[in-house]
Amino acid sequence: MSGEELVLRSTRVITPEGTRAASVVVSDGTIVAVRAHDAAVSTHARVEDFGDDALLPGLVDTHVHVNDPGRTEWEGFWTATRAAAAGGITTLVDMPLNSLPPTTTVANLRTKKDVAAAKAHIDVGFWGGALPDNVKDLRPLHDAGVFGFKCFLSPSGVDEFPELTQDQLAVSMGEIAGFGGLLIVHAEDPHELAAAPARSGPRYADFLDSRPRVSEDTAIEGLIAVAKRIGARVHILHLSSSDALPLIAAAKREGVRLTVETCPHYLTLTAEEVPDGASEFKCCPPIREAANQDLLWQALADGTIDCVVTDHSPSTADLKTADFATAWGGISGLQLSLPAVWTAARARGYGLEDVVRWMSTRTAELVGLDQKGAIEAGRDADFTVLAPDETFTVDPARLQHRNRVTAYAGKTLSGVVKSTWLRGQRIVSDGEFSAPAGRLLERKN
Ligand SMILES: [Zn+2]
């Protein structure tokens, strides 16, 4: 039994076979066995007994804007990875835009990695970006280990990351499909956005009218058509419009290689509750009505939507002005995504197994991280210890995000993260962090 350094015990271990009382045996940062709760323990092993707190695989968040270097005053690797760890996330994949430089060449990827290496409290991987003028950079970025490529079909919000036209989309998608890569898409149609009523000011209803569902639906319809023609693997980012669900379900039935994510804010906040002027709720596509949200939950349950990611996209507070038309669009969710989703999920009758599937297993699968996303032998010993029935009220002062602007302030949420573990090391416990031990990850195949 030598080499068994650590045994984690809980009456509620979330495994791929369901929730059970178990002892999880860890050696050298890897799970080596999942045994009976009362299984005999090697004499040199250290035992951590979490009682009835749940033991989850560490969450894998594949949609995070860290903004470092270049816009580090918005968020940086130090603060983002601490917030993530505090929220039970052990792996994040960083979006290619809002940092300067954006991750659109191999040299830029190196710059980002150099910055992230010493600051990462959790494991960090990188998406590349597909721009109108960097088709020649896609293959080298793929070979350098990015997990796929992000593009926009409408303006991204920052000048250095322009969107693709339909022709450019087909060119980039063809190139990426040629080497077996993944294209991830911000799907809002620029013509539908231009045709929507554009009113400035503090009224949320006006903002919602300016980003109608049809802009998502049209973009997704077009995207599916191109993906089908090229045979490419495509992922739809941050789906908000429930009207697009039938299109997506039909494409999946037809065998189009399509996956879809949504976000905690679309699942837990509603347009009806956004106060006028409260641009901490602004993101694109927008938070929509309660009836729309019900359909997103149904789609998660039936697999039309694959996974849930934060789209953590902060800015400094001064950019969150009261005018929805000009305020920065992005919601900070890293530290609160697990309790926010769990609170809403349990109210709708879902279990922690479902939350783990949406926020860890399926996101790990999306990026091919087969050492993450589940508690089973052979995987990394990444865990979240969650007290699922304990509640807390969100106090912005307790957030680790660089800017403590949050759409969740004052909400009472279920699920307190007690500790988070990365490769068998406790990285945060009751708000106390250990030194950064995260690694930089590369796509495996
Ligand atoms: Zn995003």
Image: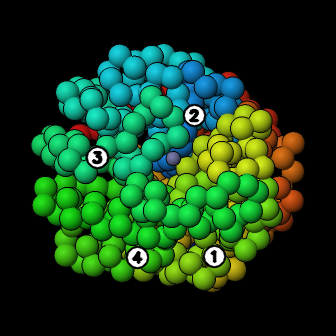
Mark 3, residue position = 165
Q: Earlier in the sequence, mark 1 or mark 2?
A: 2
User: How many numbered dots are placed on residues in this image?
Assistant: 4
Can you tell which mark lies on residue 66? 2
Can you tell which mark lies on residue 289? 1
Q: Earlier in the sequence, mark 4 or mark 1?
A: 4
Do residues under tags 2 and 4 come within 8 Å of each other at their CB atoms?
no
Q: Residues within 10 Å of mark 2 (few under 14, many from 20)?
A: many
* Residue at (48% x, 75% y) in the render: 242
Do residues under tags 1 and 2 come within 8 Å of each other at their CB atoms?
no
Q: Please state which of residues 4 and 272 is positioned toward the viewer in this rendering.
A: 272
Q: Earlier in the sequence, mark 2 or mark 3?
A: 2
Q: Earlier in the sequence, mark 2 or mark 4?
A: 2
x, y percent for residue 358 = 49, 64
Q: Callout 4, which amino acid?
A: Leu
Q: Callout 3, which amino acid?
A: Thr
Report the mark closest to the observer, 4 or 1: 1
Under circle 2, the secondary element is loop
* Residue at (47% x, 38% y) in the render: 95
Marks 4 and 3, how far apart at CA = 24 Å
Can you tell which mark lies on residue 90? none
Q: Callout 2, which amino acid?
A: Val
Q: Is residue 318 above or below residue 331?
A: above
Q: Please state which of residues 376 and 206 is positioned toward the viewer in this rendering.
A: 206
Report the mark closest to the observer, 2 or 4: 4
Give the side of residue 388 with respect to residue 307, left or right. right
Can you tell which mark lies on residue 245? 4
Q: Residues within 10 Å of mark 1 (few under 14, many from 20)?
A: some
Marks 1 and 2, how far apart at CA = 29 Å
Report the mark closest to the observer, 1 or 2: 1
Report the mark closest to the observer, 2 or 3: 3
Is any atom of residue 79 visible in this view? yes
